[in-house]
Amino acid sequence: MRRCVKAFGPSCILEYYRVIIVEGRGAELYFCFYCSGVGAAVRRTHLSCSSTRQKPVSYLARLLHKNTSFLLPSFLLSSPVLSCLLPSSPRRADTWNGAAAQGRPRNRFEQAPLYVAVLTYVGFGIVTLFGYFRDFLRALRLEKCHIAQERQELKEFVPLYQDFENFYTRNLYMRVRDNWNRPICSLPGPVFDLMERVSDDYNWTFRLTGRTLKNVINMGSYNYLGFAENNALFLTTVAEAVRGYGVGTCSTRQEMGNLRIHEELEQLVAEFLGVESAMTFGMGFATNSMNIPALVGKGCLILSDELNHTSLILGARLSGATIRIFKHNNMQSLERLLRDAVCSGQPRTHRPWRKILIMVEGIYSMEGSLVCLPEIVALKKKYKAYLYLDEAHSIGALGPTGRGVIELFGMDAKDIDILMGTFTKSFGAAGGYIAGKKELVDYLRSHSHSAVYASAMSPPVTEQIIRVIKGIMGRGGTNEGLRRVHRLMENTRYFRRRLREMGFIIYGNEDSPVVPLLLYLPAKVVAFSRAMLEKNIGVVVVGFPATPITEARARFCVSAAHTRDMLDKVLDALDEVGDALSIKFSRQKFSPRSELYDGTDFELDS
């Protein structure tokens, strides 16, 4: 081993190593230590246990703990592979669990009781049977069919409407459609006004009653920092932008739509993120879907988290690159795909991939979980891949100064190749950005469809984003932005703690303002939304196919604009509704989904 270290250097040993334990006859062990670059066993040592009752791993741990000097160099003793064997080390799953490794709360996914899953499947089964029965009645013309159908003279053509594909819409969604698309007639602040509507044909059509529900507490908008406001004192610069530039540019950035405030915003975003350059776009969804095809193409490989947003998925499909999915936040699954990609190359030809791009989100909007950024960066560096980080929900909402998951984990923004984010959440505006090295941004300015063909960002929206970023950065003689960032963190942790104390099952990280509350059964989803609205609280409920069929949920979005009295009112209502609907399923038995790192062989940068 010492000869190997002297010949190849410590970096060769640290690059890739694995402990291989083979059980021999009786209680004999053979210990082999391999390192990449050397290609052969450095040393093979025969060990024997003193008692057949001793566990081989425990015996090996004690031997390594006492006699590592003759077997291993000192710089390897602190490696994650050996630390999981030494007696004083904690459990590996806890050590390498993303946020836990940095002293942050872990992503938690509590497992529901078995009877809940069974009842959920039974509920969907009953609804499906009734749906087929109603389709049978429609075929006999005993029930009127309100949904669009093929005309008789077009029966020989390729069908536009597939009956089976629309089955869910016809028979399940339409019966509960009153819980979505509710018309709002005010700004999306901590409270809003809701227009009352009723249906006379089982939610196929609606009519407004003329009545308005006042001051409904808003627990569904992405207004994390409360900057979606109409305070005239705060919006002075935005009003000046409207007077000076109007409300639209009527051109692309490359033609006549490049304004001074656009360039000011891009410089400010780059400074805020701590990168070389940035460019902005008028639509957040298109920031992903139109820029990913400009970054990768045929002969490239995209490794995408299974819970990535639709905009990422669409961009990946439009790119023409090969797409492979890894399990959510599962570093073992990701490393397996990376290793296979590097070793095997492209299918059939086995040529090396032109690029390998890892796509993840900062906060996953349906789970409320945070990306395991330190581990992913370590894997990215190890396998020479690129990293695309979508901070749509995390920028402005996480970190001591609102700079997202990168700041939360104490990492360097230069370790992420492509930074993406949107201004539609924490900034109370619209649009998105791509940031990174200057070469990257300059390339996208001429190759991105969104940059070349899309209209430039609206001037008042641009000025709104500038106002918010300056407020978060403490410019302009006020610390209002930082105060809101800290307020959001307090509200988030308070709301999550109270929900757990009440016995609800909630997903995600303690720092995430996205709080999914699990409802499971389809009937309870509908009843929950209607009961909360009766208590003057607006919530968002989500079910299949947007979530797994057994994990329907209500998704709360906490805001810095929420007062403690508002949150207490919501929590009191949740406590009452939770008892009435029997949705307090928590047994404090956490699912294995929070321990995803067994078997991963890499180490973090110190």
Image: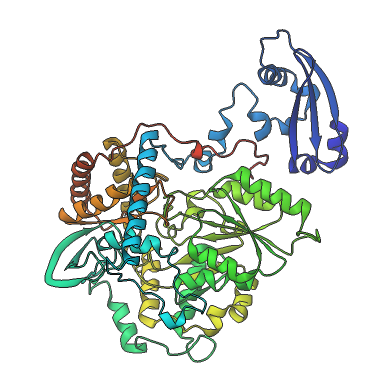
Query: Quarter of the image containing the N terminus?
Result: top right
Classify 326 as above or below 429: above
Q: Quadrant of residue 83?
A: top right
Which image quadrant is residue 584 in?
top left
67 lies left or right of 404: right
**Outermost residue toward the front in this view:** 140
Which residue does the image show at 88% across and 33% down from the upper left?
3
- x, y percentage for residue 367? 43, 50
Residue 462 quadrant: bottom left
Judge from the rendering whether residue 178 lies leftward or rightward of residue 603; answer left or right. left
Residue 363 percent across, percent down from the top left: 45, 54
Q: Residue at x 36, y 49 (%)?
A: 124
The quarter of the image holding the C terminus is top right
- Pick the front one: 129 or 396: 129
Residue lying furthest bottom:
256
Q: Position of residue 96 (x, y in %)?
A: 57, 38
Applied colour scheme: rainbow
- 50 w.r.t. 381: above or below: above
Q: Is residue 474 visible?
A: no
Compared to 223, does 325 lie above or below? above
Q: Residue at x 44, y 40 (%)?
A: 108
Asked whether the viewer can see residue 476, the reply is yes
Q: Residue furthest top?
A: 51
Percent of width and height locating residue 385:
68, 57
The residue sitting at 56% across, 29% down in the picture is 91
Q: Depth check: 451 or 319 in front? A: 319
